[in-house]
Amino acid sequence: MWRDGEVGSGLDGDPDVILGYPAGREASDPLVLGPDARLRSGTVVYAGSVIGARFETGHHVVVREQCRIGDDVCLWSGTVVDYGCRIGHGVKVHCNCYVAQFTEIGDGAFLAPGVTVANDLYPGDPRSAAVMSGPSIGAGARIGVNVTILPFVRIGAGALVGAGATVTRDIPEGTVAYGNPAVVRGPVEKLVPVGVRVEAVHGSASRFRLAHGTT
């Protein structure tokens, strides 16, 4: 493991982990990594980021410079967090996600596999690059598998975005949105309970199926 910066005690890192990788964009402060991190093979964390306690990664995770990441954050395999992001405490980002520059994610939010976050309204246009900004994802929001979130969008605290949605406009807190583009469908509190929607399948690795008469 190659390491540079201020690394807290209790680090458990695989041999090919790189900490404090030099940033090519500009001079950066040293990496600051809190105690009791668990970093798996292929993880690269750039210089200039500040990360809290009990940070955990899957395999082949990249965290770029100038990020601020809270305590108890998990980034799973194949995920990239680009530079200048803010991620709160207790956030879980699943496999193969891309979090674009200047994105903010609130405490306790969850991103399912394959979520893609954009930050450039007109890619390749210098005027667009000058106002580059990712979305803001509120505390406790849940983003479904393969969701795409476009620049400048605000997703409210506790919102739920359904699988495959493209989020082009703000989603109010505590609401469910899905579709392409995503449309608000109602409040989270009125979702049909999981136990009503599924039924057990015995003897299969796929343990549950949709219950008859539900969608």
Image (cartoon, rainbow, N blue to C red):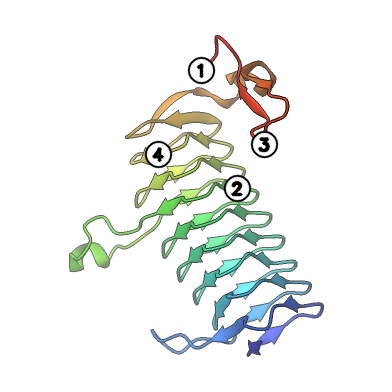
**Which mark sits nearer the N-terminus, 1 or 4?**
4
| Percent x, y of residue 183 | 38, 29
**Which mark sits nearer the N-terminus, 3 or 2?**
2
Are the residues at dot 3 and dot 4 in contact (C-beta closer than 8 Å)? no
| Percent x, y of residue 160 | 53, 35
Are the residues at dot 2 and dot 4 in contact (C-beta closer than 8 Å)? no
Amino acid at circle 4:
Asp
Q: Is residue 135 visible?
A: no
Asked which secondary structure carries label 4, the reply is loop
Amino acid at circle 2:
Ala
Q: Residue at x 45, y 30 (%)?
A: 177
Disc 3 versus disc 2: distance between alpha carbons? 28 Å
As drawn, is 83 to the left or to the right of 194? left
Amino acid at circle 1:
Thr
Q: Nearer the viewer, residue 160 or 3?
A: 3
Q: Residue at x 42, y 27 (%)?
A: 184
As drawn, is 5 to the left or to the right of 134? right
**Which mark sits nearer the N-terminus, 1 or 3?**
3
- Write down the residue under mark 2: 109
Q: Residue at x 37, y 41 (%)?
A: 167
Quadrant in which residue 120 is drawn: bottom left
- Write down the residue under mark 4: 170
- Write down the residue under mark 1: 215
The residue mark sitting in front, 3 or 2, is 3
